[in-house]
Image: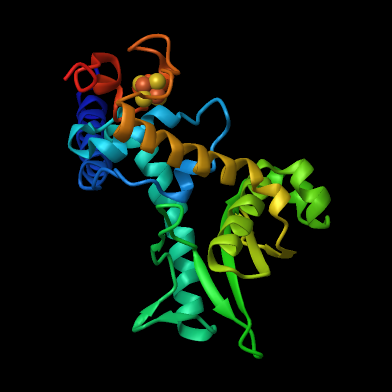
Amino acid sequence: MNITSNTTRVKEAVFHSMFTRMFVRWGANNPLRTKLHASSLIVSASEWCEREHVLLDAYPEDAEPTEQYSSAHLNAIFVHGWSLHEKWQNLFKRYGRVVYRGFEPCLDLTHYHEQYDLRYSPDAIIEDHQGKWYPVEIKGINHDEYQAACALPLEQAVLHSETVKKARVQVILYMHLLNLQEGLILAEDKNTQQFRVWWLQYDQSLIQEYLDRLSSLADAKKSLATFGTLPERKCGEFDSPRAKRCPMRTLCFSNRRLEQ
Ligand code: SF4
């Protein structure tokens, strides 16, 4: 037996475990989101659950951390992605023309839209030399996906990149909430640091699905308050993959409140 190499492996494993726990602790330190945020609204139809957001709104104290909060790997991916955002936000702050709300730069600054009861945090809001404002969505994109999309106009790029497609929806939603007509997508190749900017104009048809969700959600909240009724349960079982990602699954499957 090679004792030296075993010792080496043990030491490496100890440090690997130590570093892994940092990401677990990072996740555990994140507060649970109990208010609807734009990032939770712009999800696929299969992921969206109106019941979850009605329950979160009415019973935020019942929200529980999901597996995502304690997954070192998911947290590592998130932290890595966020570091790219911070790089651009630091550049904007030092050398760009960032819009300020009071003394706060609009760099991942959370805004609240009262009519929709919706929070949203554009990566940046900048202005041009004429003082016109633009929300900016920053995306790091895998090399192959970036190469497939970067030379194309936006209408075609979205056919080759799901990331760009999602960014388009995000920017247009921010334009809607901020009452702006133009926005920007800033996409960076994660391998080469090349980047591409797409300019886009407001087009409500691309976010109508999400505006409809908001109005349906508002009705569902009223129904709970008035009649004590909830939207249908989407998950068939408590242990289904979607339910495991839901902070309200215990309450959802208990019917405790509805029986009161
Ligand atoms: S457990 Fe499933 S059905 Fe229940 S609120 Fe959560 S996502 Fe919706």
- Taking the image as shown, residue 156 lies to the left or right of residue 250, namely right
- Residue at 76% over, 42% down: 160
**Quarter of image, ligand 1:** top left
- Residue at 66% over, 53% down: 168
- Taking the image as shown, residue 149 lies to the left or right of residue 5, namely right
- Residue at 73% over, 65% down: 201
Q: Is residue 150 visible?
A: yes
Query: Please, is residue 160 above or below residue 112 in the view?
Result: above
Query: Residue 110 placed where, x, y %?
Result: 38, 63
Q: Quadrant of residue 171?
A: bottom right
Query: Please, is residue 241 above or below residue 105 in the view?
Result: above
Query: Please, is residue 60 above or below residue 140 in the view?
Result: above
Q: Residue furthest bottom?
A: 130
Quadrant of the frame with the N terminus: top left
Quadrant of the frame with the C terminus: top left
Query: Please, is residue 153 above or below residue 23 in the view?
Result: below
Q: Is residue 190 visible?
A: no
Query: Residue 57 placed where, x, y %?
Result: 30, 40
Query: Residue 185 placed where, x, y %?
Result: 65, 61
Of residues 97 and 203, which is closer to you in this image? 203
- Taking the image as shown, residue 42 lies to the left or right of residue 114, namely right
